[in-house]
Image (cartoon, rainbow, N blue to C red):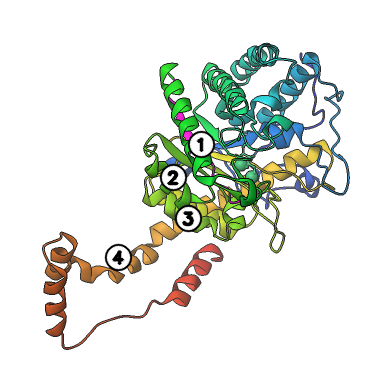
Amino acid sequence: MALEHFPGITQLQFESTRAASRDAKCRPTFRHYNPSELVESRSMRDQLRFAACYWHTMRNGLGDPFGGATAQTPWDDGTDSIANAQQRADAFFEFLTKCQIDRWCFHDRDLAPEGQSIAHSERNLDTIVAHVEQLQRSSGRRLLWGTANLFSHPRYMHGAATSPCVDVFLHATAQVRKALEVTHTLGGEGYVFWGGREGYDTLLNTDLARERDQMARFLHLAADHAQSIGFRGVLLIEPKPHEPTTHQYDSDSEATLNFLREFGLFGKFKLNIETNHATLAGHSMEHELAVATAAGALGSIDANMGTTGLGWDTDRFPTDVMLTTQIMLAVLNMGGLTQGGLNFDAKRRRASFEPIDLFYSHAAGMDAFAIGLKAAARIRADGRLHEFIRERYASWNSPMGEKIRSGQFTLAQCAHEATKLSTLVSPSGRQELLESIVNEILFATER
Ligand code: XLS
Ligand code: NI
Ligand code: NI
């Protein structure tokens, strides 16, 4: 029997609150997430496709700009040795299994230490990937997506693909080539590009047009390579407006879709939308999801949330049930997640430093999404919101509306039609009614 890294914690199960004893109420368990329960004819497990991320779960000591690490990690000796990296992976897969999380995500440098040369780094990664392949097999866990860390090493201080130094661009291609290949080896369902430093700190030293061209070239090269190695997973771009940059080129869904279209990349990439990035951009998550789904480009979700009033990517666990309801409504309305998933790109607060807090925090997020999924399904079954939107645009289905939509009228013809109108019908938007319907459904007392 392999060493247990989370002794005393047994696999989390769904237990309803009513049945639970007082003791059981303090154990990490699921109160709402019931993996096998069907919602809209699919199990919650299939609808939610949860993933945990390696970086926050295993590599984040919970330090902040004002103080160091607090997280207790008894499985980690703090060294950059291969043996330590393997043991960390063991602990992670034990965590995934005990927390009933089926999928995971990683950056190349989370898994294995950077070496003295590209070849050395690649050897390190290969060693850990071979180990992780076995862990995946024995635990039945799957890789949601992989990525390359192109932002931590000092060489990337000016960006990676958008660096003013061509050598840095080359280095980044080597890292992405390898990260794509190991993602493929591990059966990854996707591969993410988050351009951490692909933006500028100041325009005083920046040729913005050139940098955007470089980024597009880089993405074309990566997409071509993915295809050449037979990688069938989805390629994803994760928008974020800033932090660490002053401005990041793929700042939000609209900007990213525009970028993809401008450079002939649309259709090759989808979007990985993160809540805290949406709010940093001054949008709601709902907005970002609506924009992505309208373009048929929602690929996956980084599930977290920010802290109201704090202008950082605080990556809190998503426990706000109104947020999870809005997310799941967007997801169900687009036909559900078939690829992609809900990746907890989230970290515990610095004071939640015990290993058991990893379970409490993920379970809190999973339960919030279970509540959101069920509420979204009720909103859809209720039908009032859907019906209201349908009605609101009904005039466009009239013969006149059809003619305009299909381009049969010129502007002058439209203007002429306007002169014939006697009354103009424009009904109320009823926003407050609709908001109260959502509350009514969300917080309905049990019937
Ligand atoms: C950082 C990003 C990052 C990506 C993966 O803000 O969210 O964690 O998800 O590189
Ligand atoms: Ni993210
Ligand atoms: Ni983020």
Magenta residues: mostly which secondary structure? loop
| Residue 171 position within the rendered picture, expressed as x and y whole percent measured from the top left | 62, 23
Q: Is mark 4 within 8 Å of ligand 2?
A: no
State the CA–CA distance, disc 3 to disc 4. 18 Å
Where residue 268 sits, quadrant-wise, is top left
Q: Are marks 1 and 2 in contact (CB under 8 Å)?
A: yes
Q: What type is the residue that disc 4 sits on?
A: Arg
Of the image marks 1 and 3, the number of the one nearer the N terminus: 1
State the CA–CA distance, disc 1 to disc 4. 41 Å
83 up-or-down from 35: above or below: above
Disc 3: which residue? 376
Disc 4: which residue? 390
Of the image marks 3 and 2, the number of the one nearer the N terminus: 2
Which quadrant of the figure contains the N terminus? top right
Q: What type is the residue that disc 2 sits on?
A: Phe
Where residue 379 sits, quadrant-wise, is bottom left
Q: Residue at x 65, y 34 (%)?
A: 53
Q: What type is the residue that disc 3 sits on?
A: Ala
